[in-house]
Image: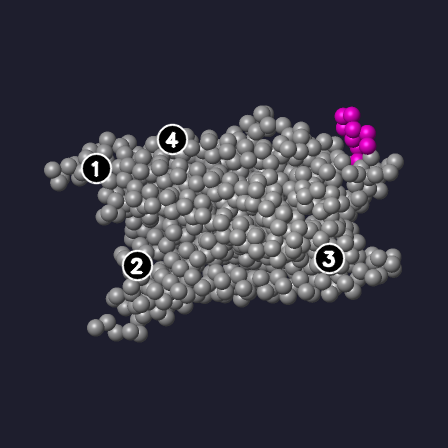
Amino acid sequence: MEAAPEMLAHAHETMFQAPSESSGAFLVICPAVIGLVWSLKEYLFVRGIAIDGLASGSLTAPLKSGANLNEETVALMKEIAGYIADGADAFLFKEYQYMAWYIVIFSALIAPLIGYATALAFVVGSVTSILCGFLGMRVAVFTNVRTTHESWKSLRAGFNTAVRGGSVMGFSLVSLGVLNLFALIWYFNSLEWSSPSECYEALAGYGLGGSSIALFGRVGGGIYTKAADVGADLSGKNEYGMDEDDPRNPACIADNVGDNVGDIAGMGADLFGSFAEATCAALVIAASSDLPKYGFTSMLYPVILSSSGIAVGVLTMIIIGMTCPVDDLSQIEKVLKYILVVSTAIQTPVSIAATYYCMPPSFSVDAEHPNVTRMDCIIPVVLGLWSGLAIGFVTEYYTSSTYTPVREIAESQKISAATGIIYGLAVGYLSCIVPILCLAVTIAISHILAGMYGIALAALGMLGTLTMGLTIDAYGPISDNAGGIAEMSELGPEVRRRTDALDAAGNTTAAIGKGFAIGSAALVSLALFGAFTVRADITVVDILNPWVFSGLLYGAMMPYAFSALTMKSVGEAANDMVKECMEQFPKIISGECKPDYTRCITISTEASLREMILPGVLVIGSPLAAGVLFGRNCTAGLLAGALVSGVQLAISMSNTGGAWDNAKKYIESGGLGPEFGKGSSAHKNAVTGDTVGDPLKDTSGPALNILVKLSAIMSLVFGTVIKNCSNSEGGPFWLAVH
């Protein structure tokens, strides 16, 4: 009887006809090429929109109230959009110079210590991440002004422009990421390796490169955007009662630039890193199982899952375009949610079909999971897929002004700023409960069924709709910029009403995107942790071990130290911004001079690049120092502490800031009544809450998910070095074992 499972597994092995290598390559390459073609089509559509001030259809109102001709207004819109594009280019080119030095120095460190193949993968991952972020930013800065122009024509035209512009980033990022990773896999498989594990461990450099760039993009971009935003609010709104994007405010252009470098380039690099790391973790774990003997296509299964999401994204965009027109302000948020729901629903059967095609009837992951079936792979993928959607909707509930939590914050701000801040903090803490339960259930079931491979598949499942997640996430900054351009160009009230509605929905989608990114980061980090234990030869992580517990305490502290560094950086840069604005305002208001936008852009750029270095050193250096000086057990504890602490702090910070932001917008829209609108004490209290929340939701909170991922991938890549610097029991090498 004891031999029955082995006999069954042998029968399955002989019955399973492994798909050919060419079919596996086709399933990866074909959807990725389709994604690039679709991305090009959408790019050409957006680029083809003429900004000429000529109406289509029955619209006859001028762009600008009281204007008879639109030429001057159109010229002003183009000028403002040009300032934003130039500012974003200037920042990114400067940031990429820093990143280039990092890539050169770190690849030179990896090559002799780990291997030249890992160094190559690191360079390819880094360059892909930079390219994807830059492409997304470039598309966003020419889509924003076109969204403003099309919103004048109709709400539907404005919405379609913003979404289709956002989809360029979504499809190009995932398609390029899949193709470059597949090219590396194909090349590495052509080389001579002592084992499959050695080959796929070298691929971990691809995830390290993507995540490293994401750290600097997220931290640098986050400091940039919030220094400008907080500085503009404190100087313009609080001191002079100006609107958010009043053209007289010299910081308003830097604020709009920040939306692109933080939420487009930064978020794009962040989610690219998640995709790369989750795929690499799954491949490393699979290589240590018996999957390699079932053929190349079975090993490619994690990449095929990601590639299938591209085809699902194209189908989703076609369905939404045909069935969900946006002709009313109330439909905007619903259609954006439908994009996520439809893509998740379609991705589910596609993932099941991919599993049945690629995977053998059963295989062994490790000694504890000797008979993993296809269904054991399907369930983690589906759990991850739907858990991601659930986390997104919970995030929406706690951050959207449509629901009770944000409205209660707004009510509390009638009394004082302090009560609003207290209430907002409570909402952020409460918002952790359901996402953590979703993650816990997903992790527990996935591990029971397929071990750490199951958790890696759950992470890939959550990232299965990445094209659509990135599309609606990029929609947010595009629509935010469109509203800013409309206000700075002093367009008519109907245009402002439409762009404000697009912007309000964009705030919610941005919050959903952050929740999605944080949730996937938790699963990715745990999968990377599992891959690290394989490479570092760790079988048990015992918290009663003093080195494990010491690492656990340090790891749990890291998110707080990281948040302190980034928030302090925003505060210092915002102070410089306020001083600059307050010096300019008297001359601007008296008409002596025009706002000096360039000076404020320079302040944000210099501060963000200077201040992103120390948080980067903390994240990159800590796991290496722990492993080299105190052994692999200490590193294992550090990764566990950073994951548990960082994920919950990231959720609460992001949702607290998002709730304060939308409480302010709810008050501005008249939600509390005309007596509590703009300029009232309640509105000033809400502005204070929003200002406090800005670095939480756009700098520290979103960057924390990169902290937990990058710590884990760094440990995985240097796993062999950490193992060699440990004694036989996993403690420090300098401590003798008795």
The image shows residue 708 at horizontal and vertical percentages of 45, 56
The alpha-carbon separation of the residues under discs 4 and 3 comes to 57 Å
Q: Nearer the viewer, residue 504 or 418?
A: 418
Q: Residue at position x 82%, y 35% from top?
A: 62
* Apparent side of residue 24 relative to residue 293 in the rendered image (left or right): right
Q: Is residue 500 visible?
A: yes
Label 1 or label 2, whichever comes before in sequence order: 1
Asked which quadrant contains residue 629, the reply is bottom left
Q: Which residues are magenta?
A: 53-61
Characterize the magenta stretch by its predominant secondary structure.
Answer: loop
**Residue 654 forms part of the magenta stretch:** no
Type of the residue with mark 4? Ala
Dot 4 crowding, Cα within 10 Å, few <14, some 14–19, many 20+: few
Q: Residue at position x 73%, y 57% from top?
A: 238
Type of the residue with mark 1? Ala
Q: Residue at position x 68%, y 43% from top?
A: 672
The residue pinned by badge 3 equals: 238
* Apparent side of residue 435 relative to residue 337 in the rendered image (left or right): left
- Residue contact between numbered discs 1 and 2, judged by CB atoms under 8 Å: no
- Residue contact between numbered discs 4 and 3, judged by CB atoms under 8 Å: no
**Res 9 label:** 1
* Apparent side of residue 63 relative to residue 169 in the rendered image (left or right): right
Type of the residue with mark 3? Asn
- Residue contact between numbered discs 3 and 2, judged by CB atoms under 8 Å: no
The alpha-carbon separation of the residues under discs 1 and 3 comes to 70 Å
